[in-house]
Image (cartoon, grey):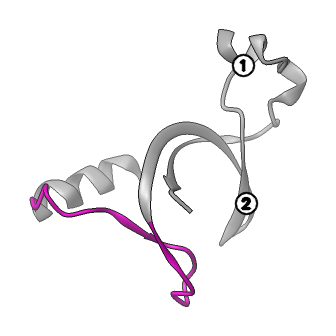
Amino acid sequence: MKVKELIKWLEAFNEPERRVILQKDAEGNGHSPLCEIGLSGYVEESSYSGYACIEELTPELIEDGFTEEDIEEGHEKVLMLYPIN
């Protein structure tokens, strides 16, 4: 799903007081409230799995000791949804 598709769906849904809950896997083996949204890099390992990485270096990341070597080559820029648990 792309951000534009999510926006379109949310605009049509139009129930702003509902909480957002994330399902942990396709089988429904756990659920958790949405805690945070952020920008991230993503490296796809298969059509259903991958891992997050640094999208780009910021002054804060450099201060924390990250360098250009910590950026995964070929990552995709994504909107990441973080669950509480």
Location of the C terminus (image quadrant)? bottom right
Q: Give the residues in magenta.
A: 14-32
Mark 1 burial class by Cα count in 10 Å: few <14, some 14-19, many 20+: few
- Vertical order, 46 against 50 (above or below): below
The answer to whether residue 58 of the structure is visible from this angle is: no
Quadrant in the picture for residue 29: bottom right
List the residue tagged with mark 2.
50
Horizontal side of 36 relative to 58 (left or right) equals left
For the image, the number of numbered tags is 2
Image coordinates for residue 2, horizontal then vertical, percent: 41, 52
Residue at 54% x, 84% y: name it: 26
Question: Which amino acid, mark 1?
Answer: Leu
Residue found at the far right of this picture? 69
Q: Main secondary structure of the magenta part?
A: loop
Whether residue 5 is visible, yes or no, is yes
Task: Tell me if 67 is positioned left or right of 55 in this view.
Answer: right
Task: Tell me if mark 2 has few (under 14), some (14-19) or many (20+) residues whose alpha carbon lies within 10 angstroms of its own.
Answer: few
